[in-house]
């Protein structure tokens, strides 16, 4: 007896007591990969309240923001949008290859948004990093968010070394969450009289500690984390009371960094504008 095999149906011949039985088995469908759960930003994460008030002191500003590998477009747009909320502030995207030669003195502040600090550093190259460093040293302002905060630190060969800070661990994939945060006494001079804890969106930003450099001053903590996330084998117990935002001087210039993402946390929309204004030399904005 001849039996033909037809795909996707498999005909299995089973001999039972001399009787030929044809058994039919359907092909098992391949399991579908589960799509990753999107990170949702609840509009009421801070109770529909404005935690950080709009700055009272402003002036026209011109800001250069990095545009290249290591900075996703949505991150650039989020930071740019907040800066543009400052009256008469303009934001110019500067491509990675331009940072080595562009005259940064035409700007008040340079900004680096979220993404990958090491890729941003590689994208602008050594000459670009030197150009940024000398701009700050000469009196310019620097604002770094998440990846841009990593870029400012002093413990990476590829970093700018404009902030006397280092990361507590080389393991950086801590995860994404809304963490509790609290403004310090020193931070109220920049952010206003904010009391109590509030939520801020966090996504693998640096957990920093003081570095041991003697050639640049120590940083000032503006706000601290009051809760933590520690996924993927990252160290536990290091985030609480570590800086969420910090400020410092470098030469004649000013440096402001944010480990988390207030730029798209409801209620914290004015935090980055206040940091930008401070970096531009506007005190107590």
Image (cartoon, rainbow, N blue to C red):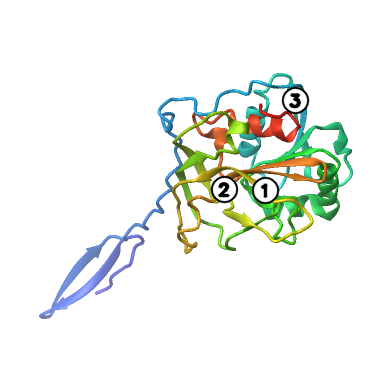
Front of the two marks 1 and 2: 1
- Is residue 88 placed above or below 152 in the rendered structure? above
Residue 232: x and y in percent read 47, 61
Number of numbered discs visible in the structure rendering: 3
Q: Residue furthest bottom?
A: 17
- Tell me whether the residue at label 1 lies in contact with that at label 2, contact meaning CB atoms closer than 8 angstroms: yes
Front of the two marks 1 and 3: 1
Q: In the image, is 285 to the left or to the right of 49?
A: right
Q: Residue furthest left?
A: 17
Q: Please name the residue that numbered disc 2 is placed on.
A: 243
Q: Please name the residue that numbered disc 3 is placed on.
A: 90
Quadrant for the C terminus, please.
top right
Q: Nearer the viewer, residue 120 or 195?
A: 195
| Residue 68 visible in the picture | yes
Question: Dot 2 lies on which element?
Answer: strand
Q: Please name the residue that numbered disc 1 is placed on.
A: 219
Q: Place residue 66 in its image quadrant.
A: top right
- Is residue 233 placed above or below 96 in the rendered structure? below
């Amino acid at each position: 007896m001849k039996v033909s095999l037809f795909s996707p149906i498999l005909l299995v011949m089973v001999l039972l007591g001399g009787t030929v039985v044809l058994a039919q088995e359907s092909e098992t469908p391949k399991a579908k990969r589960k799509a990753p759960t999107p990170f949702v930003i609840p509009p009421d994460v801070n109770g529909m309240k404005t935690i950080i008030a709009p700055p009272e002191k402003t002036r026209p500003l011109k800001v250069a923001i990095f545009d290249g590998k290591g900075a996703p477009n949505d991150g650039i747009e989020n930071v740019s949008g907040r800066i543009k909320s400052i009256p008469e502030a303009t934001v110019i995207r500067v491509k990675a290859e331009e940072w080595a030669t562009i005259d940064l003195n035409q700007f008040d502040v340079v900004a680096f948004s979220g993404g990958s600090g090491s890729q941003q550093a590689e994208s602008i190259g050594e000459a670009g990093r030197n150009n940024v460093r000398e701009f700050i040293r000469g009196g310019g302002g620097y604002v770094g968010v998440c990846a841009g905060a990593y870029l400012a630190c002093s413990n990476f060969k590829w970093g700018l070394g404009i902030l006397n800070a280092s990361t507590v661990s080389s393991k950086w994939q801590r995860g994404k969450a809304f963490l509790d945060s609290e403004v310090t006494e020193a931070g109220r001079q920049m952010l206003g009289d904010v009391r109590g804890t509030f939520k801020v969106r966090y996504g693998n930003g640096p957990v920093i500690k003081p570095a041991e450099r003697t050639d640049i001053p120590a940083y000032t903590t503006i706000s601290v984390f009051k809760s933590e996330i520690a996924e993927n084998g990252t160290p536990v117990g290091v985030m609480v009371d570590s800086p969420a935002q910090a400020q410092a001087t470098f030469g004649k210039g000013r440096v402001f960094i944010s480990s988390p993402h207030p730029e798209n946390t409801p209620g914290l929309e004015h935090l980055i504008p206040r940091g930008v204004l401070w970096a531009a030399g506007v005190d107590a904005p």
